[in-house]
Image (tube, rainbow, N blue to C red):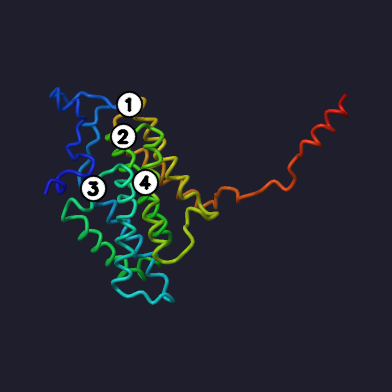
Amino acid sequence: MRNAIYCALSWNRKPRDADAAGSRDTRHNGLVNPAAFFIPAWADILAIGIGSLQGALFAAQFRDRRLDLLGVAIIGIATGFGGGILRDLLLNELPAAMQSNWYLPAATVAALIGMFLERIFSRLSGVITVLDALTIGLFGAIGTTKALSLGVPPVPAVFVGALSAVGGSILRDLLLNLPIAIMQVGSLYAVAALAGTSSLVVLVAFGVNVTVAAAVCVALTFLVRVLAVLFNWSLPEQRRLEKIPTLRRFRNFRNFRR
């Protein structure tokens, strides 16, 4: 029942040298004390619940797929768990969802709520977008702080956090046999996650309290995602160079200048 009180970030993963010395003041990569990366379990469960709710809402829209109750519930649960599982696999950790009896029931209930109340939620403008933005912000903050607490350097920690943020949507799209959203020209889905996780790492490096940094991460991710949807921001579509200068043309240009 330890995870009912503490989230995955507080799994008694002290550095070995700290265990040997009996000290809790060991620092990782010049950042803050790993003991500071401490977050209540309800925050992790909330992120999974919102992710499952959003995944079920998304899946319930596809009437032509004729998904049954179990199918929608599975997609919702996969959306809620996907980012955390990818995060823990990269960090060589047992997934948090497998260490407590609370995660799976919370994800299941949230997915069923999303499925049964999909008609109500669909009438509320932007509900899915708002939940989606909040989900990637929460998972990005949790993934990045967990990576930093385990001694992962800042740049890989940003990657872990961003992958944790978008991992659920990747698994959702795969299960629905849809093009993966973050790989399509769209509304800066992964960019929002990268912006948030990068801000967290920078703030922590400058000595800002990790709770404040995590809150800024969630807020910035949410803001970028929502503004991108509202104003149709997107990255440029992939391009190729139609004409590549050849060595002969370069030599002719040099001869011409002489």
Q: Nearer the viewer, residue 226 or 91?
A: 91
Please identify the quarter of the rendering in which residue 153 is found: top left
Label 2 sits on residue = 148
Residue under label 4, please give it.
Answer: 137
Q: Are marks 2 and 1 in contact (CB under 8 Å)?
A: yes
Label 2: how many Cα within 10 Å (few below 14, some 14–19, many 20+)? many
Give the residue type that dot 4 points to: Gly
* First of labels 2, 1 by sequence position: 1
Q: Position of residue 55 (x, y in %)?
A: 35, 61
63 sits to left or right of 244: left
- The x and y percentages for residue 32 are 28, 27
Assign a secondary structure to mark 1: loop
Q: Amino acid at mark 3?
A: Leu
For marks 4 and 1, give the one nearer the viewer: 1
Looking at the rendered structure, the secondary structure element under dot 3 is loop
Cα separation between marks 4 and 1: 24 Å
Q: What amino acid does circle 1 point to? A: Asn
* Quadrant in the picture for residue 209: top left
Residue matched to label 3: 94
Q: Which residue was labeled with disc 1?
A: 29
Mark 1 and mark 3: span between their CA atoms?
Answer: 23 Å
Instruction: Compute the Cα span from label 2 to label 3.
Output: 17 Å
